[in-house]
Amino acid sequence: MSQQGQGGGNAGEPAARATPPVFPRVPAVRVRRRRCRPVATAVIAGVIGGLIGVLLARGVPPNGADRRAPAPDAAAVAMSAGPQEDIAQGTVARVARAVLPSVVRINRSADEGLEGGGNGSGVVYRSDGFIVTNNHVVDAPGTVEVVFADGETLPAQIVGHDAMNDLAVIRVQREDLPAIATGMTRGLDVGDLAIAVGSPFGLDATVTVGVVSALGRGIHAGGHDGVGVYLPEVIQTDAPINPGNSGGALVDGGGRLIGINSAILTSGQAANAGVGFAIPVDTVIDVADELIATGVVRHPLLGVSGGPVSEPIAERLGVDAGAWIDGISPDTPASAAGLAPDDVIVAVDDRAITSMEDLIIAIRDHDVGDRVTVTYVRNGKRRYTQVVLAERSPDSAQ
């Protein structure tokens, strides 16, 4: 399989290759038009549920009050030793009761004559009407409406999209919404309880239970439209996730959201295989707050493409590991800094780089306009250059 990236790894996507694999994003349940069968109606009408993960309650609304909810009381949502014990002791039921009022259904109606209508889910991020969901739930032309747990349906306006992180924020005109409590990625451990709440296949308010299977995965998430994104450092879980969980979330045993379900591993069918992936809540918080404040998320650009250091490359260039560059996009920070094909980036500031994925994460952790020191190997010799990161264009291939 080719190991060349597409137009700008690390300011964009790394090389497509066997590891990490490509997984489809969790599709929204599509509205099938001109059908009158009861089964189709049930799927269309069912809440495409799930909660949405957000991290620390940092960032304050304009009026100075944090509108996100505090964590549920520890006495009401007890922690226990493991998933089976949690189920037996009723923890999962208490968690579900605590978070279901914040779950919404998102209906997207396609513009006249266009395909693309369907259902997804989201969660109240702030009590004054802001709701977070997946970008792929609301990115098609058409109208968006939100159905709340109390039965009220309201039209929603799209506040902003972030396709690179598969996140979006929408808003309704309502001031008394039950904002979801937010958790933390930092304290998660493999094996911790993970609860998904949603309505897969239109089955309203379905609760599924599993564990945090792995942390820090990097995946290439494909889409039905053929457009994919690289999602770094996602949470892997075996809590069953299926179509209809789009924009849904994992919640921890304390009733706090830890990640937005965005992709699933499939074997020819878009259904649960025990391997699902959620966008971590720290990313959700950063993106949601920036979209609410400005309507856009600015992504830094380096401007290189490439892949891993294979054995032949290592022998030829005299370096064991790093982000191998096979192309430099013109008029980018990389070209201005003198980087060239066959350079191997081995560090950004004091952060070691052992792969193109490492490079992508390192650049994404900076802001547009940051000056960074890039350490690279050229012809077996270690060199340094200063790079000022530019802004990546939304439609850029890099």
Image: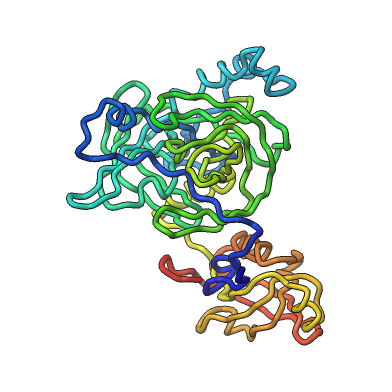
Residue 156 in view: no
Residue 212 or residue 226, whichever sits in front? 226
Decide: is 285 above or below 390.
above
Q: Position of residue 69 (x, y in %)?
A: 51, 29
Q: Quadrant of residue 308?
A: bottom right
Q: Position of residue 200 (x, y in %)?
A: 44, 32
Colour scheme of the picture = rainbow
> Most extreme residue toward the front, as rendered?
268
Q: Position of residue 355 (x, y in %)?
A: 71, 66
Residue for point 44% across, 69% down: 393
Residue for point 59% across, 19% down: 92
> Most extreme residue toward the left, as rendered?
112
Decide: is 314 above or below 174.
below
Decide: is 332 above or below 201.
below
Numbered marks: total: 0
Q: Quadrant of residue 314?
A: bottom right
Residue 6 in view: yes
Answer with left or right where residue 152 lies relative to residue 228: left
Q: Quadrant of residue 183?
A: top right
Q: Position of residue 381 (x, y in %)?
A: 81, 84
Question: The N terminus lies in which quarter of the figure?
Answer: bottom right
Answer with left or right where residue 147 lies relative to residue 63: left
Residue 180 or residue 211, whichever sits in front? 211
Answer with left or right where residue 38 lies relative to residue 248: left
